[in-house]
Amino acid sequence: MKPRPATVRIAAGQGFWGDWLEAPYRQVTGGPVDYLMMDYLAEVTMSILQKQKSRDPSLGYAKDFIPLMERILPIVAQRRIKITANAGGVNPRGCAQAVAEIARRLRLKGKLRIGVVTGDDLLGRLDGLLARGHELRNLDTDRRLSDVRDRVVSANAYLGAWPVVEALGRGADVVVTGRVTDTGLTLAPMIHAFGWRPDAWDLLAAGTVAGHTIECGAQCSGGNCLVDWERIPDLAHVGYPIVDAAPDGTFEITKHPGTGGRISVAGVKEQLVYEMGNPAEYITPDCIADFTTIRLEQKGKDRVRVSGVKGRPATDKLKVSIGYFYGYKAVGTLVYAWPDAYKKAQAADRILRQRLADLGLKFESVLTEFVGADATHGPLARANAPLDHLPEVQLRIGVRSPDRAAVERFTREIAPLILNGPPSVTGFAGGRPKPEEIVAYWPALLDKGMVEPCVEVVDV
Amino acid sequence: MKKADRKRRVPLLELAHARSGDKGDTANVGLIALKPEYYPILVKHVTAARVARHFKGMISGPVERYELPNLHALNFLLHGALDGGGTISLKTDAQGKVFSTALLRLELELPK
């Protein structure tokens, strides 16, 4: 039997699709790491990818993953760094094929194995599931999925760490997945490295907490960090987080030496509470983690130790993320200058709303915000703002409707205000806003037995 | 001495930091004490009812509160905060990213 490592180092390379392209390169070159973890998928990303795949069946994955692999594969192959990434979106096989082509071009043939995790995509199985009595009710509204069935554009179950563990166990160097949980991508290397059992709930919970801590990349190493923000050093060269994990479930959060940012107890706390529901029940496919048991300790400069994590058995359900067509929206903006900037923007808003009413246009919602006065903090900000003296205010008005024509007509009512509305207006260089299709999010639960993850591992 | 004189107004910004995010139409705000000794003040004064009053007119649903004494933090769920949430929302802050600092505008009346 292969000896178990004393620790394993897992580096976060991407916190979302569109994150800093330099980060993964710096993570694999800035010091020793064993794994590079990259999270690409947010709630609505799957529907965007499904749309791309419907236009071209070879697409449907995070396209910029491929040039990134081209840049770092020679380094990770040489240093034996393994990669876990849910960049596969709704086409993990297509993504893996593209990675394999790049690898062959880089003369890595015979030197690299690629793992693919599928089975999360339920779009083609929805009618069968509904027919068998799985209602996929909306977790927030309790509505039945059948209400919007004809408008569904994507449906994916959240898979956990175990299919990724299987791929690593079969020798995969790069594991490309569809909708695997953000936390599973970090937990899987720990399970694989340390041989954790499927019912070792405290250990699985610890790995899940580790995953949550680094899944948003630099958001735990100084980025978007409120506490002491002005004194966080060198964010231009911010170091993305690295988990230094031990077999007993304790781990340290750190980053490469010489990088910017900061790993502090306060900063890690901010990330731990991010997108938190009930902290005692952080539910994943792998376990339930209890965030009220986490102990944090500053072990040194840019090094925070995490211990004490308790977990409970996983539930018998998987979360399913469904995207369905909802309607259209558009947002238009104009900027009004001093004097009376706020009053002018308010007047323009009244005029615009009157014109929309005169045209008989019906919207599900019309929302006005005055950027510079109340867009972020609403009435809490207005109460204290020097509204009569603001140097400028941006009028930002949005509409939403199932009727595309109404939204389209709205977009033509912004520009006329420049010459036929209140004075001192500018900032319209972007042109007319475009009506945008809305794909809405429908969270549901499904019996675990209904989803069969599929793992393939191929040589390049 | 009048009763009012024995109170002082303390902005929450001086006692805590915060981060917020979204889940559907719900914004969460994690409120973290800047010093461990401030945590009991947060537990006592920053109640779900007080936060609901603070955000009156900005959210359409109830406020839930959870305690994380291990992190000296409270977690608030603000339901109906995001105009439908995610892609539906017309708000600048469609993902509830700055409800965190909006909560820090709260002023507490503490004994002197």
Image: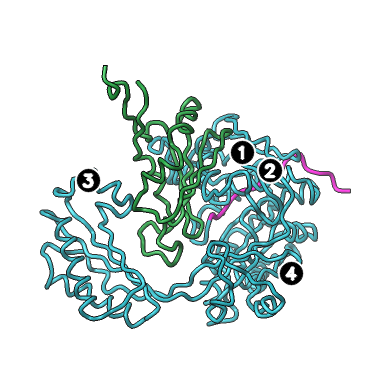
Chain colours: A cyan, B green
Residues shaded magenta: A1-15
Label 2 crowd bin: few (<14), some (14–19), many (20+), radius 10 Å = many
SS for dot 2: helix
Real-space Cα separation, disc 2 to disc 3, in angstroms: 45 Å
Locate residue A350 relative to residue B57 in the image: left or right.
left
Q: Amino acid at mark 4?
A: Met
Q: Earlier in the sequence, mark 2 or mark 4?
A: 2
Q: CA distance from mark 2 to mark 4?
A: 27 Å
Mark 1 surroundings within 10 Å by alpha-carbon count, few (fewer than 14), some (14 through 19), many (20 or more): many
* Label 2–label 4 contact, CB within 8 A: no
Q: Is residue A116 left or right of residue B46?
A: right
Chain letter, disc 4 residue: A
User: Measured from the top left, where is residue A250 in percent x and y?
Assistant: 69, 37
Q: Earlier in the sequence, mark 1 or mark 2?
A: 2
Q: Which mark lies nearer to you, 1 or 2?
A: 1
Q: Residue at x 39, y 49 (%)?
A: B98
| Most foreground residue, A164 or A393 | A393
Name which of mark 3 and mark 1 comes first in the sequence: 1
Residue toward you, A245 or A45: A45
Snapshot quadrant of residue B109: top left
Badge 3 is on which residue?
A385
Tag 1 residue: A292
Q: What kind of residue is marked 2?
A: Ala
Which quadrant: the C terminus of chain A? Answer: bottom right
Q: Where residue A31 appears, x then y in whole percent?
A: 61, 43
Query: What amino acid is found at the position of numbered circle 1 in the picture?
Result: Thr
Q: Are marks 3 and 1 in contact (CB under 8 Å)?
A: no
Q: Secondary structure at mark 4?
A: helix
The chain to which mark 1 is attached is A
